[in-house]
Image (tube, rainbow, N blue to C red):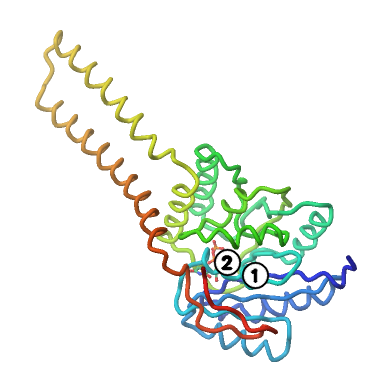
Amino acid sequence: MDKKQELISIVLPVYNEEQGIETTINTLENFAANQPQTFEFIFVDDGSTDKSVELISNQQAKHNNIRLVEFSRNFGHQLAITAGIRYTQGEAVVVMDADLQDPPAVIVDMIDKWHEGYDVVYGKRLSRNGESVFKKATAALFYRGLKRITNVNIPLDTGDFRLMDKQVVYQLRQMNEADPFVRGMVSWVGFKQTDVTYERQERIAGTSKYPLRKMIRLAMDGVTSFSSFPLQLANWLGTLSIIFSVGYLVTSLFTTMDTIHFAVFALFLMVGITLLTIGMLGAYLYRVFEASRKRPLYIVSKTVGFRTPQSQNSR
Ligand code: UDP
Ligand code: MG
């Protein structure tokens, strides 16, 4: 296909990014103007309470390739991405942060790989500038842990910055998962996947919209939607504690131990293990509950800048 004819859709979830959004748009428009392909930018406003929407709308007057999907409230980063890719028209779709942490220049490398025949090109972070030691350490640990316990090959040190061919996007659109873990779903879909490496930049402005609470939720969604390991853990812990108690029974026949103390210790151990496994079961059960309710995944209150009328249904 003639490169000028190729349409690339960029999806950008936005949550209270008033401080940097104009710079992001200007940088992206400059980038797009220098590329052989045509670009469209799909901003998904995830219930921002600041001026983000107003600032994006103002830019729409200057650029006809900016589209805006507004959520009725904050539904979260993963659902904003899910919605965004459903509104894309491009031959390929790129998902990136609206804070320029993912450098636009990397998109050129991604497009090259896509032209080579890859269907998914994900951005692998070589380094993460401007992020706390705690965030880096927990993220590194999480990705490695997740890799061990899932049967889907979710790449290490990779966020949602990636390019996907339209056939991958088509498959994702069909998935309709409540509490989606998008990067895992993209791995699950398969096709030809590869990576490009990049240095993750500091945010241009504002602060991270991912507090610890949201990070833990994302991690839990990743685990519960791609692994049954925590459920099997109950078997292992149960087996271990049985072996342990039999061992204790045998040794107590030959020695004189302070049984009261030991009983208290054993009681706490058992209660701990039991509660932990019940909690884990609960997390899975909640997922089943969420999925069975058949609520819309998100609610769109408005779409602006699309050439054809858009359906606002999420299922
Ligand atoms: N974001 C969102 N909804 C949220 C939280 C974040 O749409 O509830 C957006 C945010 O505006 C940004 C992207 O998702 O464009 C990633 O969030 P952020 O940059 O805060 O995460 P970090 O890069 O710090 O992990
Ligand atoms: Mg960011």
Q: Nearer the viewer, residue 109 or 256?
A: 109
Q: Residue furthest top?
A: 254
- Can you identify the residue that label 1 sits on? 11
Does residue 193 appear anywhere in the picture? no
User: Where is residue 199 shown, x and y percent of the image?
Assistant: 69, 56
User: Where is residue 289 shown, x and y percent of the image?
Assistant: 36, 57
Q: Is residue 122 found left or right of 251 in the rendered image?
A: right
Residue 160 against residue 241 in the figure, above or below: below
**Labels in figure, total:** 2
Q: Is residue 163 found left or right of 4 in the rendered image?
A: left
Q: Residue furthest left?
A: 260
| Label 1 crowd (10 A; few <14 / some 14-19 / many >=20) | many
Q: Residue at x 73, y 48 (%)?
A: 192
Q: Classify mark 2 as within 8 Å of ligand 1 or not, answering yes or no.
A: yes
Q: How far is mark 1 from mark 2, CA to CA? A: 7 Å
Secondary element type, mark 1: strand
Q: Residue at x 33, y 45 (%)?
A: 281
User: Where is residue 237 shown, x and y percent of the image?
Assistant: 32, 30
Q: Is residue 228 found left or right of 307 in the rendered image?
A: left
| Label 2 crowd (10 A; few <14 / some 14-19 / many >=20) | many
Q: Amino acid at mark 1?
A: Val
Q: Ligand 1 sits in which quadrant?
A: bottom right
Q: Residue at x 53, y 86 (%)?
A: 51
Instruction: Please tell me the numbered disc located at residue 81.
Output: 2
Q: Amino acid at mark 2?
A: Ile
Secondary element type, mark 2: helix
Instruction: State yes or no: discs 1 and 2 in contact (Cβ < 8 Å).
Output: yes
